[in-house]
């Protein structure tokens, strides 16, 4: 799964690192300020919006990843649930590892995640692929993996 996150001074997926304003509520409550989102496009025009969140030390959350399949050049708009595909995960590390997810595709609808892209900045173009940094917001409600025995939810809100 690719990563997903957010940042006020520019996105930057695959490791975050950009300034953002965000909160997590539900099973764990926390704020975060480092995350990133990018849109990548391959030669076949298939693409992926991906990003991640870096949680502060001491917050029992890890391995955040958010992915939204797309095609063509980056564009503003809304991506993800309820009509678009998405795959997101955040792991809670309290008393073991507990995965909370969003999965939306042609056969599965678990949780919800919407990414609103308000502006895009072309960062690189090799002719075979392109990379854009994204600005906007994320709203996601992640739920336990089915049949995991876990309960509750994680609600993630971010502006990047």
Image (cartoon, rainbow, N blue to C red):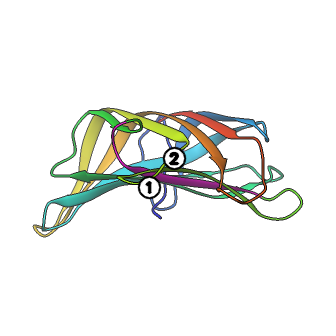
> Which disc, if any, is residue 5?
2
Q: Position of residue 2 (x, y in %)?
A: 45, 62
- Magenta stretch, main secondary structure class: strand
Relative to the observer, which residue lies in front, 126 or 153?
153
Q: Position of residue 123 (x, y in %)?
A: 26, 53
Circle 1: is it few (<14), some (14-19), or many (20+) Cα within 10 Å? Answer: many
- Of labels 1 and 2, earlier in sequence is 2
Q: Is residue 101 above or below residue 33?
A: below
> Which residue is depicted at the point 33% across and 42% down?
84
Relative to the observer, which residue lies in front, 91 or 160?
91
> Which residue is depicted at the point 78% across and 46% down?
151
> Which residue is depicted at the point 78% across and 64% down?
97
Discs 1, 2 touching: Cβ within 8 Å: yes
Circle 2: is it few (<14), some (14-19), or many (20+) Cα within 10 Å? Answer: many
Along the horizontal axis of the image, is 98 left or right of 43? right
Q: Which residue is mark 1?
A: 13
Q: Is residue 24 above or below residue 18?
A: above
Q: Secondary structure at mark 2?
A: loop
Write the start and end of the magenta stretch as one range. Answer: 83-92
Q: Position of residue 91 (x, y in %)?
A: 69, 57
Q: Position of residue 8 (x, y in %)?
A: 48, 34
Along the horizontal axis of the image, is 27 left or right of 99? right
Along the horizontal axis of the image, is 93 left or right of 70? right
Q: Quadrant of residue 128?
A: bottom left
Q: How many marks?
A: 2
Tell whether position 86 is magenta: yes
> Which disc, if any, is residue 122?
none
Q: Quadrant of residue 120?
A: top left
- State the CA–CA distance, disc 1 to disc 2: 7 Å
Relative to the observer, which residue lies in front, 151 or 33?
151
Q: Which residue reaches farthest left?
A: 127
Q: Secondary structure at mark 1?
A: loop
């Amino acid at each position: 799964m690719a990563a997903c996150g957010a940042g006020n001074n520019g996105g930057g997926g695959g490791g975050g690192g950009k300034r953002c304003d965000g909160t997590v509520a539900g099973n764990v409550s926390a704020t975060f300020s480092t995350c990133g989102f990018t849109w990548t496009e391959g030669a076949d025009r298939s693409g992926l919006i991906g990003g991640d969140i870096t949680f502060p030390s001491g917050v029992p959350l890890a391995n955040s990843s958010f992915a939204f399949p797309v095609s063509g050049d980056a564009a503003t708009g809304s991506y993800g649930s309820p009509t678009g595909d998405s795959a997101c995960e955040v792991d809670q590390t309290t008393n073991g590892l507990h995965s909370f997810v969003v999965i939306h595709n042609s056969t599965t609808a678990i949780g919800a995640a919407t990414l609103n892209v308000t502006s895009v900045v072309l960062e690189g173009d090799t002719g075979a692929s392109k990379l854009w940094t994204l600005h906007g917001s994320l709203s996601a409600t992640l739920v336990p993996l089915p049949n995991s025995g876990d309960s509750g939810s994680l609600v993630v809100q971010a502006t990047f």
